[in-house]
Amino acid sequence: MNTNSLTDNQIIALISEFKIDAQIASVKPFGSGHINDTYRLINADSGGNDYLLQRINHNVFKDVPLLMSNLLHVTEHLKKKLGPCAEQGTLTVILTRNNQPFLEDKSGNYWRVFYFMKGTRSYDQVETEKQAFEGGKAFGRFVALLSDLDISLVRDSIPNFHNIEYRLTNLQKAIETDKADRLKFVTPEIEFIKSRSGKMSEILELGKAGILPKRIVHNDTKFNNVLLDNEDKAQCVIDLDTIMPGYVAYDFGDSIRTIINTAAEDEIDTDKIALNIPLFDAYTKGYLQEADSFLMEAEKDSLIKGVLLMPYIQAVRFLTDYLEGDIYFKIHSPEHNLQRTRAQLALIKKLEENRELLEQIINDTLQSFKS
């Protein structure tokens, strides 16, 4: 049962604290996540359930009880709504022997266990229009199913996560302090960001005005947070740690940010950055197929704003970290965060150039549901 950071005895001790009524044959590091450490527990009985053991990164999620309370409220609500399909439709938390949803070990680490969902897989990149459509369906259905859950039950696990005013304030502080003596290298990037700050605050302002309602949203809608079956049909939305009150445009925009770009998030050659319009079209159709019936008109109008906002937020965060000396995001070179910033700004330019087309696709899709 060797893993990179846990001994066999530590694994055995952890497993014994949870209601896992199975003999575990092996343990393997699992997934490509950057926040939590995840291990797959392989059942000695090939016909039995496997499990996922996960160490929660409490440096990112500072209130683990709140985090797990959110997760339980959401998964229990989904199970009620999904009925017989619940087993494959949402995550299942395995409680400890003391009926708690997580364990704090003697070293102050926090652990939890889920059932492993066999017959599913995730993709770090969208490969087909069918996958994009199914991803859209999954996230649209997810927010639709949660639309009648009392929003007061779910609290912020990461305060100000998509708050653009907060992010721009942090950037301004980084500019003023210039801790890493890098300000002289980023004048064009700062000018680009400042020139769009007003427009990029529109969703937040519409929310403050009561025009956009807050809903329980995922907040991290990368495509690899959807599990598909062997025929690429959407099964389940995962990675529920960032579930918080927010605006649907955040979820829609973040998904589009991660699927529409033909290049990598940190592409050095920004000339390679282009838009995959067929994937945008497919995702939009899948998302609105599930979400059209409950979204307000103002929310539908805000979707295109989210498409532009989410790469902008990422650019602001990357540039802030660059100016502060790379203290948050993992980097592979001294200029990595600047490289990421420039790639996101190039993506924003492409999205702005094609805004009319993208908006038309959204409107045509909405119109198709009225006919």
Image (tube, rainbow, N blue to C red):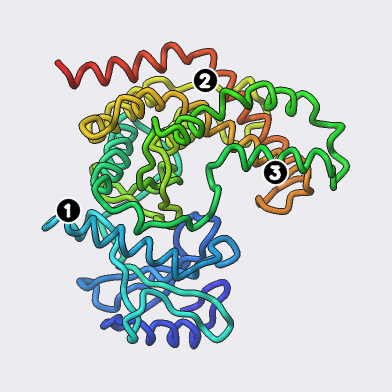
Q: Residues within 10 Å of mark 3 (few under 14, many from 20)?
A: some
Q: Is residue 337 left or right of residue 238?
A: right
Q: Is residue 24 visible?
A: no
Q: Which residue is mark 1?
A: 81
Q: What x and y, as percent, mark residue 201?
A: 56, 30
Around disc 2, counting alpha carbons within 10 Å, would you say few (fewer than 14), some (14 to 19), or many (20 or more)?
many
Q: Name the residue carrying label 3.
A: 170
Number of labels in the image equals 3
Residue type highlighted by circle 1: Lys
Of pointers 2 and 1, the one earlier in the residue sequence: 1
- Residue 284 lies, with reference to residue 163, above or below; the image says above
Q: Closer to the N terminus: mark 2 or mark 3? A: 3
- Percent of width and height locating residue 257: 49, 32
Does dot 3 land on a helix, a strand or a loop? helix
In the image, taking residue 75 as reference, residue 10 lies left or right, namely: right
Q: CA distance from mark 2 to mark 1?
A: 36 Å
The amino acid type of the residue labelled 2 equals: Leu
Verify CB contact (< 8 Å) between mark 3 and mark 1: no
**In terms of secondary structure, where does tag 1 sit?**
helix
Classify residue 130 by image quadrant.
top left
Amino acid type, mark 3: Asn
- At 83% across and 31% down in the image, what residue appears? 185
- Where residue 219 sits: x, y (%)? 44, 45
